[in-house]
Image (spheres, rainbow, N blue to C red):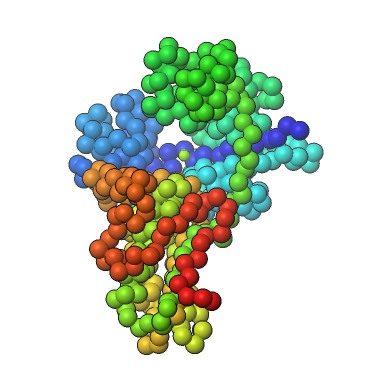
């Protein structure tokens, strides 16, 4: 059976939120990101695109390319709030949807045509979001996620595009190979060096030729170029979480040790988030006292996966939670409200150096294990970590240090 997949994507999301708050920013070139010379562009308005500006670029370079741009320091809290408002509207209308990033959603509308036209439904949902949030949003509608995502990008800004069943290949054919989701700068260069420019050329090639050049990735790219994609919509659940906890050999009241363990736990879970390209928007600390009474406290946070943002918040939660001078048997932390996303986007205070520091540390962990680099303050808790991939559907490993 043919599926009907909707892809929704807010247009220049951070810029649009800034414009909601200050109408004078309308139609002006805007750069959102770190404001220091060492900062990074997190988002840029359409008015800056003609100057060669793109997100991920050093702010200094963007400023040089587009000197008249207005530069705004991003605010992860505000963006998270608006992302949640949009999510709630979608949740109300479509019970099963995927939140693939802070500003992007997929929904499987298969079967809905019997009751109500999918296109009409999508169009009404889009206009409802625009009306209720004031934020421009675009959508693509087709038989799968890949074609819908490409359609959304072609529809932008603030528009919609439906690709009729059977017209996927001709729709993709004239587009640049750069528009295939997952073709990054490196793959693009490789394909360009082979003389490929339009998706049409890949469509005319045999699949194994692509496979020979690019390995397993080549086959995926070939399928995508031909409009073939079977990936399912993964339902978004705010309850989806990763967690870790520790039961002590001997109950403890040693606050310095407890804080060290919490730091090590946070550092490790944040690394797991980054490794799974995920962000959290809700963190929790759990304490079990020696009398088995268990308490936990949670806190909503702007979407992040950065240790230096999470650690102080975890310690703060622990401080408010640990108000009895009682022996502790167990402590644990949990991150939930997970969405797909890159941690760079919320680091508006940070510089290229911090971003590359995280990259370098994570590379060392990838290669030598997750205990190879740790904060000095968490060094006392050497046995925290060594978690397998927490996003493979398996329950997280519980670090038990005594027989339960
Ligand atoms: Mg977007």
| Residue at 54% over, 36% down | 138
Residue 58 relative to residue 399: left or right: left
Q: Can residue 150 be seen in this view?
A: yes
Q: Which of 95 and 317 is in front in this view?
A: 317
Residue at 49% across / 25% down in the picture?
215
In terms of depth relative to the viewer, which is nearer, 319 or 333?
A: 333
Residue drawn where x is 47% and y is 23% of the image: 214
Residue 33 rendering spot, x and y as whole percentages: 31, 44
Q: Position of residue 151 (x, y in %)?
A: 56, 28
Q: Where is residue 86 in the image (x, y as percent from the top left)?
A: 53, 50
Quadrant position of residue 167 = top right
For this orientation, the residue located farthest to the right is 114
209 relative to 165, above or below = above
Of all residues, the one furthest to the left in this rendering is 37
Q: Name the residue rendered at 37%, 82% in the picture.
A: 252
> Where 399 sits versus 41, above or below?
below
Q: Position of residue 370 (x, y in %)?
A: 37, 54
Work out whether 360 lies above or below 62. Answer: below
């Amino acid at each position: 059976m043919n599926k009907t997949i909707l892809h929704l994507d807010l247009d220049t999301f951070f810029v649009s939120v800034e414009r909601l708050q200050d109408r004078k920013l309308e139609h002006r070139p805007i750069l959102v990101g770190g404001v220091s010379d060492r900062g990074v562009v997190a988002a840029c308005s359409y008015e800056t695109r003609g100057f060669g500006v793109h997100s991920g670029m050093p702010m200094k370079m963007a400023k040089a390319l587009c000197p008249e741009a207005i530069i705004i320091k991003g605010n992860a809290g505000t963006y998270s709030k608006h992302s949640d408002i949009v999510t709630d509207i979608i949740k109300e209308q479509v019970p099963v949807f995927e939140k693939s990033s802070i500003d992007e959603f997929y929904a499987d509308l298969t079967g809905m045509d019997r009751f109500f036209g999918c296109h009409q439904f999508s169009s009404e949902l889009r206009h409802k979001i625009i009306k209720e949030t004031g934020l421009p949003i675009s959508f693509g509608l087709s038989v799968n996620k890949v074609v819908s995502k490409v359609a959304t990008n072609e529809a932008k800004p603030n528009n919609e595009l439906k690709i009729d069943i059977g017209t996927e290949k001709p729709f993709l054919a004239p587009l640049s190979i750069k528009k295939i989701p997952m073709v990054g700068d490196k793959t693009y260069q490789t394909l360009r060096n082979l003389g490929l420019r339009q998706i049409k050329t890949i469509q005319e090639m045999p699949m194994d030729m692509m496979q020979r050049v690019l390995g397993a990735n080549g086959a995926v790219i070939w399928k995508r170029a031909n409009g073939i994609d079977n990936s399912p919509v993964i339902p978004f659940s705010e309850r989806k979480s990763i967690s870790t906890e520790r039961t002590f050999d001997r109950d403890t009241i040693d606050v310095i040790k407890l804080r060290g363990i919490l730091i090590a736990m946070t550092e490790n879970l944040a690394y797991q988030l980054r490794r799974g390209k995920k962000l959290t928007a809700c963190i929790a600390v759990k304490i079990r006292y020696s009398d088995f009474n268990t308490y936990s406290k949670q806190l909503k946070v702007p979407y992040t996966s950065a240790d230096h943002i999470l650690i102080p918040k975890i310690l703060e939660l622990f401080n408010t939670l640990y108000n009895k001078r009682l022996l502790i048997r167990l402590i644990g932390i949990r991150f939930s409200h997970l969405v797909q996303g890159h941690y760079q986007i919320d680091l508006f205070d940070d510089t290229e150096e911090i971003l590359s520091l995280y990259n370098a540390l994570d590379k060392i962990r990838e290669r030598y294990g997750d205990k190879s680099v740790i904060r000095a303050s968490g060094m006392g808790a050497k046995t925290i970590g060594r978690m397998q991939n927490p996003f493979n559907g398996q329950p997280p490993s519980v670090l038990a240090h005594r027989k339960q």
